Image (tube, rainbow, N blue to C red):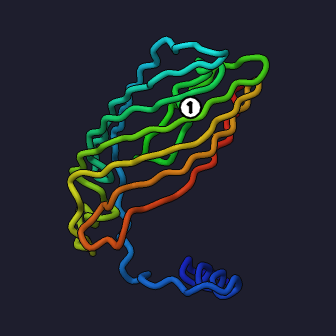
Amino acid sequence: MLFRSEQVQNNLHDLIGVDRAYGWDNQLKDEAAVNLMFARRWRPTPLTFLGLEADTVPSVGGSLGNVFTFGAVGTMLRLGQRLDIDYGPAHIQPSLSGPEMMSTHSGLSWYLFAGTQGRVVGRNIFLDGNTFRDSHSVDAKLFVADFQAGVAIAYGSARLSLAQIWRTKEFDGQDGHDEFGAVNLSWHF
């Protein structure tokens, strides 16, 4: 028996007692996705006081393609111990991101972080609709910002990060800002 995604999602919603999903007839049509993304971060020498380190990790980035086209600038503040393990935690794109590069230290490393990123958005396929075919769309905002806060803990070659992200409205008529969490477990080998 072949199940469609709509059936699976609605059966799960029925099982857990939440509203069914609507809008399946308004999905994007299939199309190839081509995107070139870049990100650059700088990690200055941290300030040290009372056994803690503090730094600011500025960043620039962008994307060019039929899924996302945007330019971004941001910064992240970190406070903790052994900040040289990474450039910040990894997150869902196009949010603030930390490269998955991570140094291995013996012992415990940790930091609290808070950051912001602003984007000038030229294209977001999920709001603008299909590139090569007619599909539903909304009037997207030109400027979008993300704010995040969280904690990262590393021991040896493993890192766990927890973050809360707040994103400004992305389109006209949106009821409010988006808010979501991210959990990332990384292992360097």
Q: Quadrant of residue 170?
A: bottom left
- Name the residue at 59% across, 34% down: 112
Decide: is 46 above or below 147.
above
> 20 or 116: which is nearer to us?
116
- Name the residue at 73% across, 25% down: 157
- For residue 149, side relative to residue 109 (left or right): left
Under circle 1, the secondary element is loop
Name the residue type under label 1. Glu
- Name the residue at 61% across, 24% down: 102
- The location of residue 111, given as percent across then percent down, is 62, 30
Q: How many marks?
A: 1
Q: Which residue reaches farthest front?
A: 50
- The location of residue 80, given as percent across then percent down, is 62, 25
Q: Residues within 10 Å of mark 1 (few under 14, many from 20)?
A: some
Which corner quadrant holds the C terminus?
A: top right
> 26 or 56: which is nearer to us?
56
Q: Quadrant of residue 126?
A: bottom left
Which corner quadrant holds the N terminus?
A: bottom right
- For residue 7, side relative to residue 116 (left or right): right
> 74 or 125: which is nearer to us?
74
- The location of residue 135, given as percent across then percent down, is 26, 73
**For mark 1, what is the residue?**
100
Q: Quadrant of residue 134?
A: bottom left
- The location of residue 140, given as percent across then percent down, is 23, 62
